[in-house]
Image (tube, helix red, strand yellow):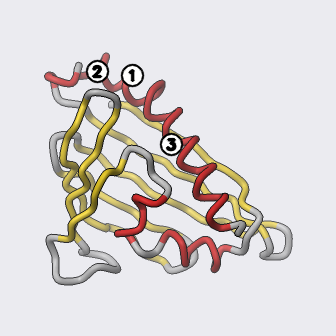
Amino acid sequence: MSIIKVSIQIDASPEKVWRIVEPIERHIDWMHDAVAIRFVSEQTRGVGTAFLCDTKVGPIRLTDKMEITEWVPGRAMGVKHIGIVTGTGVFTLEPLADNTRTLFKWEEELVFPWFLGGPLGAYVGGRIVLRQIWKRNLRDLAALCEK
């Protein structure tokens, strides 16, 4: 298992950040490892929303099956990974500076299958590679929110 944590302070209110993060299908606008998102549930927002995310990290391509497990508008979005890579993740938004800034945290616990290196793949792929990609993703998210 790999535990990955990244965060960034964004110069925008949690409400504004949520407006960018809430449309799951638009995550491809700021996530470099997300190529396409396709809903497999009728709903596209809230707990129970299920979707497929085509993911590309270097030469590795896979389709990540996910389901929203937590949905608190302006505060948190949790997800369960139920595809090739399994685990859980959550975005949390914390107000800063009288609600004019946001601390955005992204935390994931991922389990990689043996053919992606198992525990070694989780360490290298998760803690090193994905952490760097996700830090870049958060910089792009911040840029979108601060426009």
| Circle 3 SS class | helix
Is residue 128 or residue 20 the one in the foreground? 20
The residue carrying mark 1 is 123
Q: CA gap, disc 1 to disc 3? A: 15 Å
Please name the residue that numbered disc 3 is placed on: 134
Does label 2 or label 3 sit earlier along the sequence? 2
Which residue type carries mark 3? Trp
Tag nearer the camera, 1 or 3: 3
Q: Position of residue 6 (x, y in %)?
A: 57, 43
**Element at badge 1?**
helix
Q: Which quadrant does the C terminus fall into?
A: bottom right
Disc 2 crowd, CA 10 A, few/some/many (<14, 14-19, 20+): some
Q: Residue furthest right?
A: 97
Q: Secondary structure at mark 2?
A: helix
User: Foreground: 71 or 24?
Assistant: 24
Which picture quadrant has residue 15? bottom right
Image height of 99 relative to 88, above or below: below
Q: Is residue 122 above or below residue 141?
A: above
Q: Give the numbered dot on residue 46.
A: none
In this figure, which residue is indicated by the disc labeled 2? 119
Which of label 2 and label 3 is nearer to you? 3
Q: Amino acid at mark 2?
A: Pro
Q: Earlier in the sequence, mark 1 or mark 3?
A: 1
Residue 27 on image: x %, y %:
42, 62
Find residue 77 and report its horizontal and vertical position in percent.
Answer: 44, 67
